[in-house]
Image (spheres, rainbow, N blue to C red):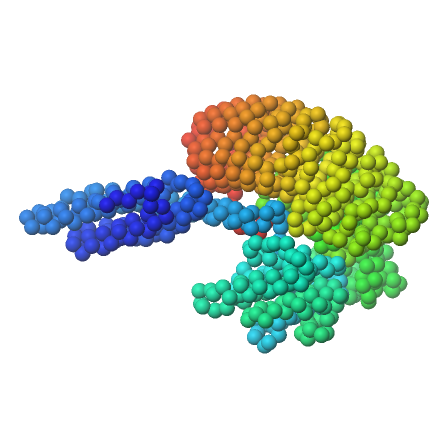
């Protein structure tokens, strides 16, 4: 009896495959003359079935249909009927001693199965991407509001390490040995390479083989926030995270979840071991370390700290590099090649010896001297010889790092940009897009991010920062830097704060304020400070902050950075007096989106040009008292923005907006219609908004739009036909729009389109003929399956096939 796909569901393929294979086995016993054909047919079916069954199951989860599955169902049903007929005819014809006549039809069936088998790679890609979409949906359901920046997985493996091989082997042995030791503490002063060591260890094949995906890595920082730490650990376990009543409740829930993970029996019927990695643990965290030592079989804790914590027993002291390794690392950092350098070896020896084998000092000092003339090297040698730069304490290390910046002039943009990095919280990734906003106004960088990225690369070259790509959708060619972050070592951040707060002629360019437990700095409480002349003002508050502000006069402030963690946050009343303010960056580093109060005060900032809001609930924009005529760029990341557009006339409030960036706002279902009336809008980027289902029909009225980016809007099913009216559009990105199954016919009218991104458009199985009219299209960036769609066109642009990277690290 035939089975109907629409009614039977996921059991169809399993049943059909089993029945067909049984029919083939029976036929081989009854019609030996077909054995070779039937053996090959059996092999094909066995190869295809497991993969397609998984696709069908995923389709059911997503309430979607798949033509390939239906095609296979028809093929299996017709094949089953044919093989049965063959065996029946063989019995009848054998009785009459005549040869059978079904060989041709069986060969044809085997050829069809073979063609289907050749499509297996494309089906594999489809299955992988469907799995990714299912996982995204599950994560968004489990962690509402966490978007693409939640959690804190193991950092990327260091590109190269020098002199850590022995330490790696010894630590690995301790972690893999069942000797009753649950916690290992890697202890050393700042700059010794603790984080590098434990990160490299987490990427070791034996460690990954033993602990699997149960390696949970989290950075604690100086201020211990237990609830937040636990939330970040639990996000990595992909289990729903609720609000905790207290620190004790958070630790109890962590223990419960880890026990659940550990007792999830694996294929070998063994307990699943767990590795909890706690980086940057400061003195005062003893109680937390004590509380997380749960009685779980196979559970290990690896701690990296400047402190020793003798009460916990197993301490692994990390020493500096030996002279040979120190020389090797310094040569790499300084770009020295023995055959080419004109730097006397005795100078190099003295400088390396003064660094005391500390990797951070060797890297930073080495980079500061890279490509410098001999005179600069001799000056550095004299500093070492005077004894002022020899490292003994962390203060000595700090002074060494400070002197490595002396080769830069005070007004050098590289140095000034480095000092700006101290305005962001400790151990937090700094979004490149936020830095671009700041530096365009503070340092006069160009508006396309090129100068800012050049500066970041120079900082990385000097080992003052690291650049991380968290999500693989950044594209610097088109000046798109979403998913790129800068990180700064603790000591270097402290150096930036120290140097950035120094006064010249009684003035300071930066005012960096940290408020913990509601305690304002004394100078602020006593009102002894004259109006600050700082151009950059940074205020960081913790989760206990009550939003009761003191007045502050900062008439010269051009950039205001607000870092907070509380569920409710009131913008300071003094911001309405910041008449020169051009950039506002407000970031919530807590778990849940923050409710903002006093939001209407932003409407009084007449000079404001750029605003960036992250992980907050944005109130109605219509409550702004006046127009923000100078506002050109708005960026919202992981925000609740549904209320922002209600009862709001965007054209009145933001009449001169040039760029809109909306990233991972999970409550964005549709764009407001009046966004199409922003006549000056040139760049519209909507990424990772999985619930966005459609674009306004009038989007074609954005006559000046040059870039439209819709990356990872997995719920977006189509583009409106009016998109063909975007005559100035040069870049269109629909990558990872997994539900988009067709493109509008009018897309062929995009006569200025030069670059089209269409990677992993899972459902897109054809292109409109009108795309042959895209004469200016120079490059298409896509996957192999989408590249095949272009083969039907006589003239094709340059096709760049990107390697599939199905992973969820960016989540």
Relative to residue 205, is residue 4 drawn left or right? left
Q: Quadrant of residue 617?
A: top right
Is residue 234 among what the camera can see? yes
Relative to residue 587, is residue 534 drawn left or right? right
Give residue 245's position: percent from left, percent from top.
66, 57
**How many numbered circles are shown?**
0
298 versus 440 height, above or below: below
Q: Residue at x 69, y 45 (%)?
A: 594
Q: Residue at x 65, y 57 (%)?
A: 244
State the residue in front, 568 or 759: 568
The residue sitting at the left extreme is 96
Q: Please state, as top left, top right, bottom left or bottom right, where the N terminus lies in the image.
A: top left
Relative to residue 188, is residue 102 drawn left or right? left
State the residue in front, 136 or 407: 136
Q: Quadrant of residue 252?
A: bottom right
Q: Residue at x 84, y 36 (%)?
A: 577
31 versus 391 height, above or below: above
Give residue 459's position: percent from left, percent from top.
74, 48
The residue sitting at the bottom extreme is 179
Give residue 502's position: percent from left, percent from top.
88, 50
Give residue 682's position: percent from left, percent from top.
65, 29
């Amino acid at each position: 009896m035939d089975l109907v796909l629409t009614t039977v569901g996921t059991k169809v393929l399993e049943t059909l495959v089993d029945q067909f294979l049984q029919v083939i086995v029976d036929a081989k016993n009854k019609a030996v003359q077909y054995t070779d054909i039937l053996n090959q047919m059996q092999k094909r079916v066995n190869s295809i079935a497991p993969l397609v069954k998984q696709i069908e199951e995923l389709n059911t989860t997503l309430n979607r249909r798949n033509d390939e599955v239906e095609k296979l169902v028809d093929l299996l049903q017709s094949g089953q009927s044919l093989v049965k007929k063959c065996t029946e005819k063989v019995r009848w014809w054998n009785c009459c001693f005549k040869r059978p006549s079904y060989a041709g039809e069986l060969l044809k069936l085997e050829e069809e199965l073979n063609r289907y088998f050749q499509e297996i790679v494309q089906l594999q890609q489809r299955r992988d991407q469907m799995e990714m979409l299912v996982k995204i949906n599950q994560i968004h359901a489990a962690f509402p509001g966490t978007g693409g920046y939640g959690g804190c997985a193991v950092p990327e493996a260091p590109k190269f390490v020098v002199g850590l091989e022995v330490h790696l082997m010894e630590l690995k042995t301790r972690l893999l040995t069942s000797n009753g030791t649950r916690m290992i503490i890697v202890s050393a002063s700042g700059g010794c390479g603790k984080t590098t060591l434990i990160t490299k260890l987490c990427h070791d094949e034996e460690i990954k083989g033993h602990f699997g995906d149960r390696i949970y890595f989290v950075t604690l920082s100086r201020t211990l926030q237990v609830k937040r730490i636990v939330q970040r650990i639990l996000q990595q376990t992909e289990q729903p995270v609720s609000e905790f009543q207290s620190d004790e409740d958070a630790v109890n829930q962590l223990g419960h979840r880890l026990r659940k993970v550990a007792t999830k029996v694996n294929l070998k019927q063994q307990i699943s071991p767990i590795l909890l990695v706690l980086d940057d643990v400061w003195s005062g965290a003893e109680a937390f370390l004590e509380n997380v030592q749960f009685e779980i079989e196979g559970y290990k804790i690896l701690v990296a700290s400047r402190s020793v914590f003798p009460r916990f027993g197993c301490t692994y002291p990390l020493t500096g590099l030996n002279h040979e390794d120190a020389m090797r690392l310094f040569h790499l950092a300084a770009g020295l090649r023995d055959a080419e350098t004109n730097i006397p070896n005795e100078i190099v020896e003295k400088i390396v010896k003064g660094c005391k084998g500390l990797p951070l000092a060797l890297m930073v000092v080495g980079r500061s001297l890279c490509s410098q003339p001999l005179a600069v090297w001799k000056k550095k040698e004299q500093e070492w010889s005077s004894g002022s730069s020899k490292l003994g304490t962390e203060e000595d290390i700090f002074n060494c790092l400070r002197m490595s910046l002396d080769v830069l002039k005070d007004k050098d943009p590289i140095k000034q940009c480095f000092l700006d990095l101290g305005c962001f919280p400790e151990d937090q990734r700094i979004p490149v897009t936020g830095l671009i906003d700041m530096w365009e106004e503070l340092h006069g960088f160009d508006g396309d991010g090129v100068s800012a990225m050049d500066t970041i690369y120079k900082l990385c070259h000097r080992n003052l920062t690291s650049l991380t790509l968290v999500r693989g959708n950044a594209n610097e060619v088109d000046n798109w830097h979403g998913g790129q972050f800068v990180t700064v070592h603790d000591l270097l951040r402290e150096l930036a704060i120290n140097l950035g707060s120094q006064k010249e002629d009684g003035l300071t360019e930066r005012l960096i304020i940290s408020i913990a437990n509601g305690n304002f700095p004394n100078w602020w409480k006593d009102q002894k400070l004259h109006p600050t002349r700082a151009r950059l003002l940074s205020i960081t508050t913790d989760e206990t902050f009550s939003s009761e502000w003191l007045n502050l006069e900062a008439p010269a402030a051009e950039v205001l950075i607000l870092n907070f963690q509380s569920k409710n946050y009131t913008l300071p009343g003094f911001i309405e007096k910041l008449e020169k303010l051009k950039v506002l960056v407000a970031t919530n580093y807590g778990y849940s989106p923050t409710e903002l109060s006093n939001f209407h005060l932003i409407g009084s900032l007449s000079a404001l040009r750029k605003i960036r809001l992250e992980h907050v609930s944005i109130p109605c924009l219509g409550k702004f008292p006046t127009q923000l005529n100078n506002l050109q760029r708005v960026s919202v990341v992981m925000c609740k923005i549904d209320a922002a557009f209600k009862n709001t006339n965007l054209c009145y409030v933001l009449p001169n907006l040039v760029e809109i960036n909306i990233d991972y706002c999970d409550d964005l279902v549709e764009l407001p219609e009046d966004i199409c009336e922003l006549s000056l809008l040139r760049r519209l980027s909507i990424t990772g908004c999985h619930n966005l289902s459609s674009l306004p029909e009038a989007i074609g009225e954005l006559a000046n739009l040059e870039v439209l980016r819709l990356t990872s809007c997995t719920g977006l099913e189509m583009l409106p036909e009016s998109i063909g009216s975007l005559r100035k559009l040069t870049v269109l990105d629909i990558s990872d729009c997994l539900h988009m199954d067709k493109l509008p016919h009018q897309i062929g009218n995009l006569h200025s389109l030069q670059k089209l991104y269409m990677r992993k458009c899972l459902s897109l199985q054809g292109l409109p003929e009108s795309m042959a009219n895209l004469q200016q299209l120079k490059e298409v960036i896509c996957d192999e399956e989408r590249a095949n769609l272009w083969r039907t066109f006589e003239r094709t642009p340059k096709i760049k096939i990107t390697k599939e990277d199905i992973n969820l690290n960016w989540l």
